[in-house]
Amino acid sequence: MPTGQTSEPQGWYHFIARGNAACSLQRYDIAEQHFRNAVQDGEKTGVRTDKLAHAVFNLAWVCHQQSKRTEAEQYYLQALGLVEEVYGPEHPDVAIVASCLGRLYRETDKHHEAQPLFDRALQILEQYAL
């Protein structure tokens, strides 16, 4: 290996992989930090990309798992906007984010906010049913 190079990968992929590994061990506190780093890395370009959407969604999900509901809501909403912008409003990933946000709302007794999200997710996924 040339001098000055490390064998450990850096950047967004590294943070996502580490965050996913921590999630698989239910170490959500560690996963959260990796996903925060992935979001920061994804924001560096100033362009709203699928990488940024993925990182923000993962951060929302891990906050949700830790019952950090206010943060989770904020990140789910951000992820929903990013996914709609990057993939379009009828993409299956929109359904996934919408259903997760709906679940969060249901858990916090915001049923009137949850139902439209579940309805939207179902409508999107029905388009892809075989």
Image (cartoon, rainbow, N blue to C red):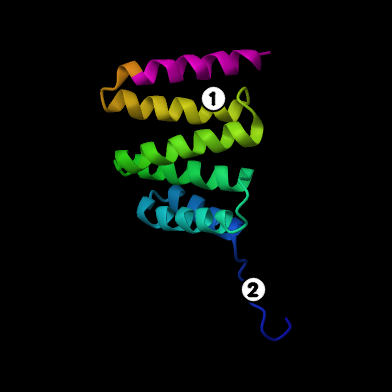
**Residue at left 36%, top 20%?**
113
Q: Quadrant of the C terminus?
A: top right
Label 2 sits on a secondary structure element that is loop
**Quadrant assignment, res 49:** top right
Vertical side of 122 occupied by 61: above or below? below
Check residue 122 for magenta coloring: yes
Circle number at residue 7: 2
Q: Quadrant of the N terminus?
A: bottom right
Q: Is residue 45 left or right of residue 96?
A: right
Q: Position of residue 40 (x, y in %)?
A: 51, 57
Q: Which portion, as a residue range, is magenta?
A: 113-130
**Amino acid type of the residue tagged 2 in the rendering:** Ser
* Residue nearest the viewer, comparing 67 with 70: 70
Q: Is residue 93 left or right of residue 5?
A: left
**Amino acid type of the residue tagged 1 in the rendering:** Ala
Q: Position of residue 117 (x, y in %)?
A: 45, 20
Vertical side of 101 occupied by 38: above or below? below
- The tag earlier along the polypeptide, 2 or 1, is 2
Q: Is residue 112 left or right of residue 86?
A: left
**Quadrant assignment, res 109:** top left
- The kind of secondary structure the magenta stretch mainly shows is helix
Vertical side of 20 occupied by 14: above or below? below
